[in-house]
């Protein structure tokens, strides 16, 4: 379809016709901007413009100030949505819109911080499941009370969670959360030091098992001081007794064969997806 014909159709008074034209791959970007600027354009047509992959960032920013929720949802999902529009959308109250924002692969820190204050659990879930979420925002979410266990577990497994946050989470009274932490791909040696003294045997054994890693031994040897609220360094070094560690390793491996780790696999699969 020729561009001039698409422009004529995009300006057609019939919503279905104008919407179809604005969704057409060959519609000129100038036409999309022209239709978006009109005050009498149907929200359905505006939503189509917000969905078009070639809609310009400045047009998306203009659409972000519209009062129509269906338009704003489409803007929030557009990969070219500019930061100014994202910041404006983050102050909205619509849950579906905010979830769409939280799931974006690139999101400014200030927008993440705004979303972390959301009252919607699904928004927070999208945020803590997003690999791009920063350590500061993850820490902010943990301060929300009450916080569902599933959210806390996803924070515990998130690659950007800071050592300071993991240290605090490792001292909670939730044994399942501590199991998630000790099962992370990377665990700071200070956290393993705490979990090596865990009251739950399989968590304690898993931490002691990981401390057998030569890299962990080297890192532990470089630790010169601990904060007052952590276990003493001498106590952690005591867990490195060879016989005790070999016994802990055997118990850890036996527990790993028998334990039902379906919840942990589900969390990992959901996070990696």
Image: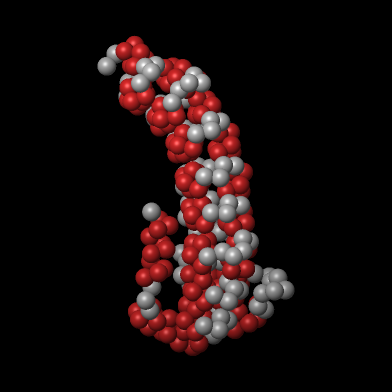
State whether residue 104 is above or below residue 10. Answer: below
Q: Identify which residue, 161 or 148, lies in the foreground.
A: 148
Q: Can you give x and y, in whole percent of width and height, for residue 236 in the image?
A: 60, 79
At 40% across and 56% down in the image, what residue appears?
272
Residue lying at the far top in this picture: please name it.
Answer: 4
- The percent coordinates of residue 59 (x first, y second) are 50, 25
Q: Residue at x 38, y 64 (%)?
A: 266
Q: Can the viewer see residue 206?
A: yes
Q: Residue furthest left?
A: 1
Above or below, comparing residue 46 to residue 163 in the picture: above
Q: Quadrant of the N terminus?
A: top left
The quarter of the image holding the C terminus is: bottom left
Name the quadrant containing residue 188: bottom right
Q: How many marks?
A: 0
Q: Is residue 246 in view?
A: no
Horizontal and vertical percent for residue 42? Answer: 43, 26
Report whether 182 appears left or right of 230: left
Question: In the depicted view, which residue is nearer to us: 66 or 271?
Answer: 66
In the shown orientation, is residue 142 left or right of residue 257?
Answer: right
Q: Is residue 185 above or below residue 25?
A: below
Residue at 40% across / 82% down in the picture?
Answer: 255
Which residue is more in the foreground, 32 or 271?
32
Colouring mode (rainbow / by chain / secondary structure / one colour)? secondary structure
Q: Position of residue 253 (x, y in %)?
A: 39, 80
């Amino acid at each position: 379809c020729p561009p001039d014909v698409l422009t004529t159709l995009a300006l057609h008074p019939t919503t279905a016709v104008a919407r179809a034209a604005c969704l057409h791959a060959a519609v000129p970007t100038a036409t999309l901007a022209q239709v978006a600027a009109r005050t009498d354009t149907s929200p359905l047509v505006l939503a189509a413009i917000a969905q078009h992959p070639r809609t310009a960032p400045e047009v998306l920013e203009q659409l972000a100030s519209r009062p129509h929720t269906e338009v704003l949802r489409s803007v929030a999902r557009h990969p070219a949505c500019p930061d100014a529009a994202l910041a404006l959308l983050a102050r909205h109250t619509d849950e579906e819109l905010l979830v769409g924002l939280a799931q974006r692969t690139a999101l400014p820190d200030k927008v993440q911080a705004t979303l972390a204050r959301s009252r919607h659990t699904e928004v927070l879930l999208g945020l803590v499941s997003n690999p791009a979420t920063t350590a500061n925002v993850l820490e902010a979410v943990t301060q929300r009370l009450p916080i569902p266990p599933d959210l806390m577990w996803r924070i515990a497994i998130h690659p950007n969670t800071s050592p300071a946050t993991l240290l605090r989470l490792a001292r909670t009274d939730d044994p399942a959360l501590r199991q998630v932490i000790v099962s992370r791909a990377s665990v700071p040696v200070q956290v393993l030091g705490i979990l090596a003294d865990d009251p739950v045997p399989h968590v304690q054994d898993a931490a002691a098992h990981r401390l057998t890693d030569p890299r962990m031994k080297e890192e532990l040897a470089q630790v010169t001081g601990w904060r007052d609220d952590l276990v003493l360094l001498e106590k952690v070094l005591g867990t490195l007794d060879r016989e005790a560690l070999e016994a802990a390793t055997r118990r850890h491996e036996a527990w790993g064969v028998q334990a039902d780790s379906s919840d942990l696999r589900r969390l990992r699969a959901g996070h990696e997806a």
